[in-house]
Image (spheres, rainbow, N blue to C red):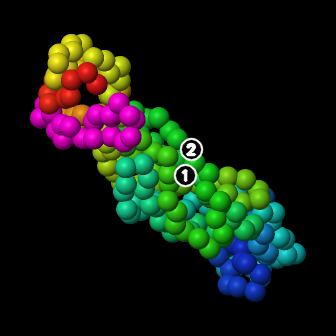
């Protein structure tokens, strides 16, 4: 009876075979995908006709070369700070046949700018803290696993999180605009960065003429105005 099809299967050496393809009678080849690096396989082909199937023809054992690792699980964001977040993840289901030497974390902000951060870890580690982020900025994170062969594919994205606001940067260009016997007037420029939260006031400090330390003279100006008067000063100082 004529052959009507061929069935291709494979097995990790010593394990049960897995059927992966059925090839028509005119076919003489098949592509087997989703195999793992540094793993030994045996391949089988069975012929079918109207009566039944033949015994299996098998290949010799073949060990595939190592490849880059699979994608890790989507990172889970834990503690969120002003400039850093903690990440944890599930390790890739397969390391590609070569031990994982590290991970690459990609921090993507709301403007789609990507900050690539290399994380060197032991093969068994699945957590880290990502530093040097910008305060009050929304990020999501991807991971890639790395072995000696190369870099694996991107993981799924983490949930989006926003880093905490930070204190504002220092005001600029402080200047004295008017001097009276016991009072002087000050003006300054707004901080270059408000830390992610509106400036609600300023503290005014004074240093004595002897240079011995600073004294807080206005704990809170009570507004975002960039000028104020300081009273109660000693004359001729």
Q: Residue furthest front?
A: 236
Residue 69 visible, this angle? no
**Label of residue 47 in the image:** none
Q: Residue 202 versus residue 106: which sits nearer the camera?
A: 202
Q: Position of residue 160 (x, y in %)?
A: 35, 50
Q: Height in image: 137 above or below 14?
A: above
Q: Residue at x 47, y 65 (%)?
A: 88
Quarter of the C terminus within the rendering: top left
Q: Residue furthest top?
A: 178
Q: Are marks 1 and 2 in contact (CB under 8 Å)?
A: yes
Q: Is residue 129 visible?
A: yes
Local packing at callout 2 (Cα closer than 10 Å; few below 14, some 14-19, many 20+) is some
Q: Residue 31's quadrant in the figure?
A: bottom right
Judge from the rendering whether residue 146 lies leftward or rightward of residue 157; answer left or right: right
Q: Does 147 lie within the magenta span?
A: no
N-terminal of the pair, mark 1 or mark 2, is: 1
Q: Residue at x 77, y 56 (%)?
A: 149
Point 46% across, 61% down: residue: 87
- The tag on residue 116 is 2
Q: Is 190 above or below relative to 62?
A: above
**Helix, strand or loop at mark 1:** strand
Q: Residue furthest left?
A: 222
Is 37 situated above or below 60?
Answer: above
For residue 174, which quarter of the picture? top left
- First to last magenta residue range: 205-226
Residue on which the image places disc 1: 105
Locate the N terminus by quadrant. bottom right
Q: Nearer the viewer, residue 46 or 11?
A: 11
Q: Main secondary structure of the magenta part?
A: loop
Mark 2 secondary-structure assignment: strand
Residue, x 18% and y 41% (percent of image)? 219
Residue 73 appears at what percent x and percent y?
Answer: 50, 63
């Amino acid at each position: 009876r004529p052959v009507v099809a061929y069935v291709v299967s494979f097995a990790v050496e010593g394990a049960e075979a897995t059927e992966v393809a059925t090839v028509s009678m005119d076919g003489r080849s098949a592509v087997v995908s989703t195999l793992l690096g540094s793993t030994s396989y045996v391949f089988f082909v069975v012929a079918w006709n109207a009566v039944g199937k033949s015994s299996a023809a098998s290949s010799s054992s073949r060990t595939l070369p190592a490849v880059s690792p699979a994608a890790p699980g989507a990172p889970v964001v834990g503690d969120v700070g002003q400039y850093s977040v903690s990440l944890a993840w599930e390790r890739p289901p397969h390391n590609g046949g070569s031990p994982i030497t590290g991970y690459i974390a990609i921090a993507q902000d709301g403007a789609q700018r990507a900050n690539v951060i290399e994380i060197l870890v032991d093969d068994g580690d699945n957590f880290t803290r990502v530093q040097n982020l910008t305060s009050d900025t929304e990020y999501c994170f991807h991971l890639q696993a790395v072995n000696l062969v190369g870099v694996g594919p991107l993981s799924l994205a983490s949930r989006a999180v926003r880093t905490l606001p930070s204190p504002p940067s220092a005001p600029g260009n402080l200047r004295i605009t008017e001097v009276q016997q016991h009072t002087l007037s000050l003006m300054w420029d707004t901080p270059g960065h408000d830390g992610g939260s509106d400036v609600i006031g300023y503290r005014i400090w004074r240093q004595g003429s002897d240079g011995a330390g600073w004294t807080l003279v206005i704990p809170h100006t009570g507004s975002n105005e960039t000028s104020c008067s300081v009273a109660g000063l000693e004359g001729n100082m």
